[in-house]
Amino acid sequence: MPKHKHTEGEAFRYLENAKALLKNASIENDFFLDRKPVREAFGTAYLAVLEAINEVLLKKGLPAKQLPKSVDAYRAALQKYLSVNNGKLVREFGNLYDSLHIAGYYRGLLSNATVVKEEIKSAETFIKKLLT
């Protein structure tokens, strides 16, 4: 099986996919009616965040084999390579993990359209901070 080769801009592609999932989802009274596309969008947005971190770590010289494989490893890598003197990125990542991955994707707790869109926007802001 061929190994996945990380390509530049992958995070933005994932983010656009997440937005596309929401674009076709029905909203009534500011709530998404179907949770499935919302959960898929959250999962995809979280993957976009991970792809952005991977891209930065690769640019810093970390070999692909050593990319993080767990949320704790991502936190540690952010701390070691990107937030040496400032824990803000680690906190932002933790918040995105909680909202995108746990509340939005895993538990499917978020369906308010305003909240969902704000969380996707938070992911975009984090990604842009890392990559631009």
Image (spheres, rainbow, N blue to C red):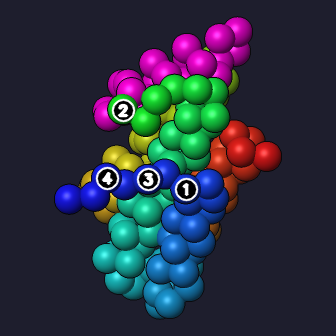
Secondary structure of residue under mark 2: helix
Task: Using the image, tell me which numbered label, if any, was put on residue 7.
Answer: 1
| Mark 1 surroundings within 10 Å by alpha-carbon count, few (fewer than 14), some (14 through 19), many (20 or more) | few
Q: Which mark is residue 3?
A: 4
Q: Which residue is mark 3?
A: 5
- Which range of residues does the magenta coloring cover? 66-86
Query: Which label's residue is closer to the chain start, 3 or 2?
Result: 3
Q: Earlier in the sequence, mark 4 or mark 2?
A: 4
Q: Residue at x 44, y 69 (%)?
A: 41
Residue 85 lies, with reference to residue 50, above or below; the image says above
Q: Secondary structure at mark 4?
A: loop
Farthest residue, direction right: 132
Image quadrant holding the N terminus, namely bottom left
Query: Is 33 placed left or right of 95 in the picture?
Result: left
Q: Earlier in the sequence, mark 2 or mark 1?
A: 1
Amino acid type indicated by mark 3: Lys
Say what amino acid the circle numbered 1 marks: Thr
Give the alpha-carbon distance from disc 4 to disc 2, as whole Å. 11 Å
For the residues bearing labels 4 and 3, Cβ distance under 8 angstroms: yes
Q: Residues within 10 Å of mark 3 (few under 14, many from 20)?
A: few
Q: CA distance from mark 3 to mark 2?
A: 11 Å
Q: Label 2 is placed on what type of residue?
A: Lys
